[in-house]
Every structure is written in C-alpha cells, then in structure tokens.
C-alpha cells in the first residue's frame, strides 16, 4: 500500500438507503447530541456562504461548513435551491452533497449525496421539537403543504410520537395530496390518511400537531384553527397569521438570533414590532440541555420554527456515513495514488 495514497468513500442516495441510513431516530439522536456539543462550545460554526444567481427567483447555491471537534470531523454541505425547478423542469427544487474530512491529517473521508441528509435534518429538528413541545398522547397531525419537507416531517414526528394514527393533508392541488397519501401510507400503514381537497382548515383545525411546509408566502394558517394544547411546527417562510404566534405560550426556534434576520412569520413580526426578543421562550438546545423545560401543561399551545443549522446537517451526515461504513456500503474512490512528484511517468504528463 502506497503511503501517500488517499482514498475516500462515495455514497449515493441508494447506497445510504440500502445501508439503513433513512433512520429518523438516528438523525434525531445525532441532532440532540450536536446541540449538546454546541452548548459545550465544541463546534466550529462559521457563517454560510451564499451565491444568488437570480434575485427574483432566489436561485442559489449555499456552502455551509461546520466542525464537530469531539468527533474530529469537519464537513460542508453544498446545497442548491432552485424554487422554479418543479414547474420549469419537473425536477426537485433542492439538491445537496456533503464532503466530510477528518481533522487529524485533514484528508477527506467521504463524498455523499446530501439531499437525503438535508431533508432528514429538517424533519429531525421538527421531531426533536415535537418530543419536547407536543403532547405525549398526540394522535392527529395536520399538514398544509404536502411536499418533500412535509413528508420528512411526518416521518420524524411519527418517530417522536408513535401514537399518531391520523394524518390530514392539504396542498395546492389534490394530485399532491393524493401522492402524499399514497407514498406515506406505504410507509405508515397504521396511519389513517385524510385528503382535504386543498382545504387548509379541514387539514389542521383541531389537530394535536399542526405543520405548515409550503412554498407559499402568505398567512395560510389561522389562529382559530389551533386548539389549546396543540403544537405547531412552522417549516416554510411566511405561512401563518401573526395571531398564531401571539396566542402560543411558548415560541421556540432552532436559533432565534438566526431566525430573526430571515423572512419567516416571526421574523416579520419582529421587524414589524409585533414580537420582541423576550417573547421567544427558548432555542431548542436550551430544552435538550434541560435548562428550559419543554411542554409544562396539557393545554398550552406551542410554536416551533427552525431555519437550519449547518452543524446539525453535518452531524446527521456523519451519523449516516458511520452507519454506511459499518455496512461496507458505497464505493472507495482514490483521490491520489502518490504525491505529485513521486509519479514515475510525470515527465510524460507534463505539458511544456
Ligand atoms: N426550515 C428549514 O430548515 C427548511 C429547509 C428546507 C426547506 N424549507 C422550506 O420548506 C418549504 C417546503 O419545501 P418543500 O421542499 O417541501 O417544497 P415542495 O415544493 O416540495 O412543496 C411545497 C408544498 O407547498 C404547497 N403549497 C404552495 N402554496 C400553497 C398554498 N397557497 N396553499 C397550500 N399549499 C401550498 C404545495 O402544494 C406543496 O405541497 C419551502 O418554503 C422551503 O423553503 C425549510
């Protein structure tokens, strides 16, 4: 074995799926562990780099790095968001890859398909929030929006609250509701799926857990539809009227300092002077550490909004890589066999 050879593992989405990495429990555990590490200041978490190619359409590619010091791993998510893809090309909006490097020699160890991990992170944060903020006996979950994030959020919340036995769904079109029902029924045969013919109220009114995961920028969710004791997971941008947050006893974010500079409903409320820093009860890591209690009474309404923390993405990708490695999944790619000037035939390759 050449001592200067560098190998890394390539993992496609199918490699990850076959190796058992579509595991929301594993993702939620990785997310909670990373939040604890973050609070212990064991995470390097620099600013993301954003490159926008079409301002009006918000077409962009983001580069999101983070280092997990205890695991000795530095990773980056390279993620593209092209919101017009579904309408324009019949293709998905979001696509991502991860690179993971060890930080003993600094060499890359994995190059992975990342849409799966990225979507699992969105779901997992909702699942962890549901664990702390929803009623333990939650049975009915209602969705406005039936896309990729909605599906993953259902998978995670069902993991956190296995008592869920009814899922109501509304989307812009009945076809999407049908697709959601068919795809998710195959995964969760114990859930009764109810389509609503694009009726948001029918989907969420009186549900124990409400989720909005839409591409709309409008106050779709009304406060009157959220019963006492309900937990609301807000996944998209602007999706609920201001009165929803105002009536909630606890508003929790993944990171309020990040959320408040975005364009989520509660960020808009903050900018409009309708919500102050003091109105935010906690960030999710505060509940994971136990510094702040989660739900305290059966009838309090709770609100969760996450915009994404790349250290959680990297932690979930790492847990998937470790599981895939244990299953000997993927392909070994050789980055180099020798250091450059060690190649015996370098003179034949040099262009003068
Ligand atoms: N919070 C996060 O960390 C995070 C991460 C990724 C994506 N997102 C956001 O989540 C949202 C959903 O993403 P996705 O990948 O599932 O998108 P998607 O395109 O797969 O699904 C969007 C859904 O919204 C529905 N919708 C749009 N307008 C609607 C309306 N007026 N009424 C009812 N339903 C409507 C569509 O019918 C569709 O079901 C987007 O806003 C995206 O930016 C958030």
Image: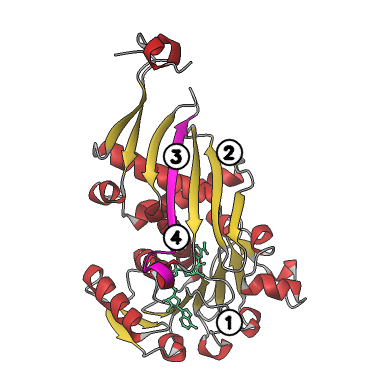
Q: Is mark 1 within 8 Å of ligand 1?
A: yes
User: Which is nearer the N-term, disc 3 or disc 2?
Assistant: 2
Up the image or down, 106 lies above or below 113; here it is above
Left or right of 302 in this view: 168: left
What element does badge 4 sit on? strand
Left or right of 240 in this view: 85: left
Which residue matches tag 2?
A: 42
- Distance from disc 1 to disc 2, alpha carbons, whole Å, reads 38 Å
What element does badge 2 sit on? loop
Left or right of 190 in this view: 146: right
Residue 276's image quarter? bottom right
Q: Which mark is residue 218?
A: 1
Which residue matches tag 3?
A: 99
Q: Is mark 4 within 8 Å of ligand 1?
A: yes
Viewer-side residue, 196 vs 282: 196
Instruction: Look at discs 1 and 2 and give the one toward the viewer.
Output: 1
Residue 326 in the image: state x and y as whole percent.
Answer: 27, 37
Residue lying at 54% horizontally and 34% vertically, measured from the top left: 69
What element does badge 3 sit on? strand
Instruction: Look at discs 4 and 2 and give the one toward the viewer.
Output: 4
- Distance from disc 3 to disc 2, alpha carbons, whole Å, reads 20 Å
Are the residues tagged 1 and 3 within 8 Å (C-beta)? no
User: Which is nearer the N-term, disc 3 or disc 4?
Assistant: 4
């Amino acid at each position: 074995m050449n001592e200067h050879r560098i190998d890394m593992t390539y993992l496609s989405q199918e490699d990850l799926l076959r190796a058992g990495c579509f595991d929301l429990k594993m993702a939620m555990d990785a997310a909670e562990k990373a939040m604890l590490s973050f609070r212990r200041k064991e995470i390097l978490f620099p600013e993301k780099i954003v490159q926008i190619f079409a301002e009006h359409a918000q077409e962009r590619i983001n580069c999101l790095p983070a280092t997990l010091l205890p695991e000795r791993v530095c990773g980056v998510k390279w993620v593209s968001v092209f919101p017009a893809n579904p309408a324009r090309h019949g293709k998905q909006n979001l696509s991502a890859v991860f690179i993971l490097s060890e930080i003993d020699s600094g060499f890359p160890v994995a190059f992975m398909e990342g849409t799966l991990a990225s979507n699992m992170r969105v779901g997992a944060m909702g699942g962890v929030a549901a664990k702390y903020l929803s009623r333990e006996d939650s049975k009915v979950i209602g969705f406005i929006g039936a896309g990729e994030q909605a599906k993953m959020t259902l998978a995670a919340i069902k993991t956190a609250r296995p008592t869920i036995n009814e899922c109501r769904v509304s989307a812009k079109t009945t076809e999407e509701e049908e697709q959601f029902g068919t795809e998710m029924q195959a995964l969760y045969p114990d859930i009764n799926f109810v389509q609503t013919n694009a009726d948001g109220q029918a989907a969420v009114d009186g549900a124990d857990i409400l989720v909005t995961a839409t591409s709309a920028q409008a106050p779709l969710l009304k406060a009157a539809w959220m019963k006492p004791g309900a937990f609301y997971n807000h996944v998209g941008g602007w999706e609920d009227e201001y009165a929803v947050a105002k009536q909630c006893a606890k508003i929790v974010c993944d990171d309020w300092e990040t959320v408040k500079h975005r364009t989520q409903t509660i960020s808009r409320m903050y900018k409009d002077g309708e919500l102050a820093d003091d109105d935010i009860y906690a960030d999710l890591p505060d509940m994971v550490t136990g510094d702040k209690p989660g739900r305290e009474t059966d009838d309090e309404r709770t609100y969760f909004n996450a915009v994404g923390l790349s250290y959680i993405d990297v932690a979930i990708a790492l847990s998937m890589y470790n599981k895939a490695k244990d299953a000997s999944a993927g392909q070994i790619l050789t980055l180099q066999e020798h250091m450059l000037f060690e190649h015996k035939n370098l003179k034949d390759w040099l262009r003068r």
